[in-house]
Image (cartoon, rainbow, N blue to C red):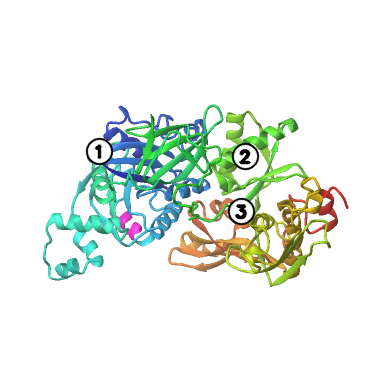
Amino acid sequence: MRSLNLGILAHVDAGKTSLTERLLYNAGVIDEVGSVDDGSTQTDSLALERQRGITIKSAVVSFVIGDVAVNLIDTPGHPDFIAEVERVLSVLDGAVLVISAVEGVQAQTRVLMRTLRRLRIPTLIFVNKLDRRGARYDDLLQDISVKLASDIVPMGDAHNLGTRSPRFQASSGAWQAALADHSDELLQAFVNDQRIPYGKLHEELATQTRKAAVHPVYAGSAITGAGVDELTQGIRTLLPAAHPDEDGPVEGAVFKVERGPAGEKVAYVRMFSGTLSNRQSLDQGKVTAVSVFDRGSAVPRESVRAGEIGKLWGLAGIKIGDRIGATPDKLQHFFAPPSLETVVEPRRPSDRGAMHVALTQLAEQDPLINLRQDGVRQEISVSLYGEVQKEVIQATLSEEYGLEVTFRETTTICVERVAGTSEAAEFLGANPFLATVGLRVEPGTGVEFRLGVSLGAMPYAFFKAVEETVHETLTQGLHGWQVTDCLVTMTHSGYAPRQSHAHAVFDKSMSSTAGDFRNLTPLVLMDALRQAGTRVCEPVHRFTLELPPDLLGTVLPALVRLGAIPQPSATGLEGEVPAARIHGLQLQLPTLTSGEGVLETSFDRYEPVSGPPPRRPRTDHNPLDRKEYLLHVERRV
């Protein structure tokens, strides 16, 4: 049987979870279509999801369409949980992008479609909620073509919009014209007014869809079931289902980690090749149990095979983004990192330790939370995409861990970039550690460590200690922000060879260890960084603001006061605005535009801040202050 790993993506409230329910019902997996409003759906299993009626965590279900076994992953639609979507994208064969026929193309819809197109993931589009009052189709196709993708292929016509019995009537009338842009043969036939047989057209449609060259558009209602049969056939015949290689090398990717009832780690893995068996040993530990998604939820199995999605127990060292088996690649990042940060405080001081444990477990499930602990102030910070994510963290800590917490005011996360080139070195015998370390810092792309000395100059473990410490130290630059785009080259090295007394007892005081290099590297690196200098940069977002022309005179001055650089566009205004001002803009917008303004923002770049650079409190032993650093590290001045 062929297999297909399919993602359902959409802006929040477009109806993707309801569509998942309808697909499961039509496939005979469930006897009754669940309701998001009633909290009875298969994929929204968290209590918080059922209460809010939104998807927070990705969920996997499976069903069979003819000769295709589909593993369907329902993803969050709210932009605050875009990290969940990101992790799913790395394991997809194809996707269905759901658009509401009432609200149309929304901000998150654009973000998702841009990413799907950039990654060339074959994508079908489903216009949902044809049964709702105000539903559109023909003019919405034009919006989709302009705002999402010009290469769409309408798969039929919609009738009885806004009623309880909408219909979607399949038609191939527009296929030839839409496909001709990517086929010389079809273009020639189209110009000569030659009709192409349906079978050949469908074959070409499947080929172009699997190449992500075109995007077939279906329409219907997940609630009534209209159009879902046609979409189902599109999933089976147009997306790239394949016969996976179950006998090949073991290769898989972990896209989700959760905690079981006993607190154990459970890893979700998509297998690309080979077969992974229970009791098999991996770099992250030994597999103690396996379950595989099969015609519904996960069921216990002895192995998970290529093309399947499984849950693995026993891998204590597993992390999101890890590769299973032969492929060493880590999970790629497709969206901008979180640009907000807040300090979490327990209402009861005695809960501080339990809160740290709980947040650590949440960070395992969402690495972009990026937990930062300040040992000096006994504070814990988390990274965020938005205020809704803060509310979810607060509710999760309360409901799952019994911890009541509060948050300080949300602040913007900046970065530091190296301004120049400089070197620093500390030599054996002239510092408190048995090590020589010399480093040069200069602007680069990403954070990269290179050797400017011979690899045979000292044991490899010492070089590894320096490299790891360089990356760790650069998480806090001269102003406390993470240093990005920095090339670090090791220019000097030296160590004290292993020494022992007469009776061959190892003498630490006379011999270098990796700890000497770990302790010395921050002093050298920050000295070089101080001489090179850094610039603090803040995130800047692109924005588009759709609004009536008569409101331009009111909105423009408000945007300028917020630090935005606006320019007129065909539908309103567009431009850029500092990320720190977006929340204020969102709060003012309903009043400024009488509720008629539609704002879309997306991360664009980092730009140097104007005025005094903001500082972030340090959470390390402050290698910028030699006396303070040595006091903590060596317990001496």
> Which region is colored magenta?
139-145
* SS class, disc 2: helix
Q: Are marks 2 and 3 in contact (CB under 8 Å)?
A: no
Mark 3, other Cα within 10 Å: few <14 / some 14–19 / many ≥20: few
* SS class, disc 3: helix
Vertical placement of residue 65 versus 421, above or below: above
Type of the residue with mark 3: Gly
Mark 2, other Cα within 10 Å: few <14 / some 14–19 / many ≥20: some
Picture quadrant where residue 487 is located: bottom right
In the rendered image, residue 87, in percent from the top left (x then y), is placed at: 47, 48
Task: Give the Cα separation between the discs numbered 1 and 2.
Answer: 49 Å
Residue identifier under label 3? 584
| Disc number placed over residue 360 in the picture, else none | 2
Q: Is residue 620 left or right of residue 590?
A: right
Type of the residue with mark 2: Thr
**Of callouts 1 and 3, the N-terminal one:** 1
